[in-house]
Amino acid sequence: MDYEKIESSARNRKIALNSVIYTLLVIWAIFVLFPFYWMVLTSVKGYGEYNSEWIPKLFTLTPTFDNYVDAFTAVPLGGYFLNTLIFTLVTTALMLFVTVLAAFAFARLEFKGKNIIFVLFLSLMMIPTELVVITNYVTITEWDLRNTFTGLILPSVTSVFYIYLLKENFAQIPDELYYAAKVDGTSDFRYLYKVMIPICRPTIVTVTILKVIECWNSYVWPRLVTDDQAYYLVSNGIQEIRENGFGRDNIPAMMAAVVVISVPLIILFLIFRNKIMEGVSRGGMKG
C-alpha cells in the first residue's frame, strides 16, 4: 500500500512539473510568435482601417490582399527576389566548396604548422565585424567591383565558424577509415567525396541552411557596395520600398513586403529544422 502511495505521489509530482513546463513553454511561444502574427495581421488590413484604429485590434473582419499587390508593383520586388536568389545560391555553393576543403585539410591532412595555422585562423573570429567590413569595402572599391554580383559575393565565400564546425565533425571519423582507403589507393578527394561527406551530411546540410539564411538576411554589406537598384537584394530593397515605394506612412503595405520576404526562410526552417538540430548536435560531440 505504501508503494502505491509513493508511486501515486511521484506520478502527481511529475504531472504537476510537466504542467508547469508546458505552461511556461506556451507563454514563451506566444511571446515569440506574436510579432509575426502582428506582422501578418497588419499586412491584411486596409490603409484606412489601420490608420483609423485608435487602439490596435488583434483581428480584422475585412482582410485585404491589396497590400501584397502594392508590394510588388510599387517597386521591382520580383527583381530583388531574383537578385537575392542568385546571390544566395552562388555564395552558398562557393562557401561550401571552400569550407569543406579547408575543414578536410585541417581535420585529416598532415602538414607543417597545421595547428598553429588553425589557431591563427580561429583568432580571426576575435576581429570585430566592423573592421572586416571596412577592409572589405576598401578592397572591393579599389578593385572597381561595386554594383556587381562579384563584389556582393566575394567577401562571403568563407566562414571561420563553419570551417571550425565541419573540422570538428570530420575529426570524429576514425582514422582507420582513412588509412584503409589510402591502402586501397583512394585519393584524398575521393575519400572526402565518398566517405567523409556522406557521414557528415547532417552537419553540411545545417551549414548550408544557415548560410542561406545568412545570405537572405544580409543587409549591411549589400547596402554598402550597391547603390544601383538593379543589384538590390530583398533586405536592402525594404529601405527602397519605404523611401520610394509607398511611403513611410503605409505600414500595412510595408508589412506585406516583409511577410513576402520572410516566408521563404520560415518554410525552409520548418522543413529542415530537424536537420539543423541534428547537425549542430553532431558538430559539438566529441568522440
Image: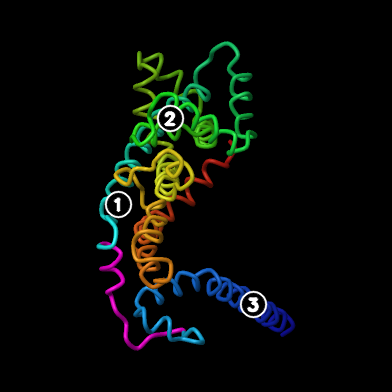
Q: Mark 1 or 2 closer to N-term?
A: 1
Residue type pointed to by label 1 = Phe
Considering the numbered disc 2 on the image, is that residue within a helix, a strand or a loop? Answer: helix
57 in the magenta segment: no
* Residue 234 badge: none
Quarter of the image containing the C terminus?
top right
Q: Amino acid at mark 3?
A: Val
Relative placement, left or right, of 43 versus 36 is left
Which residue is at a point 41% across and 81% down the rendered structure image?
A: 50
User: Measuring 28% from the left and 75% from the top, which residue is drawn there?
Assistant: 65
Q: Which residues are magenta?
A: 58-72
Q: Is residue 120 left or right of residue 282?
A: right
Identity of the residue drawn at 34% across and 28% down: 194
Question: Dot 1 corresponds to which residue?
Answer: 81
Q: CA distance from mark 3 to mark 2?
A: 44 Å
Q: Which residue is mark 3?
A: 20
Q: Residue at 27%, 55% (x, y): give it.
A: 76
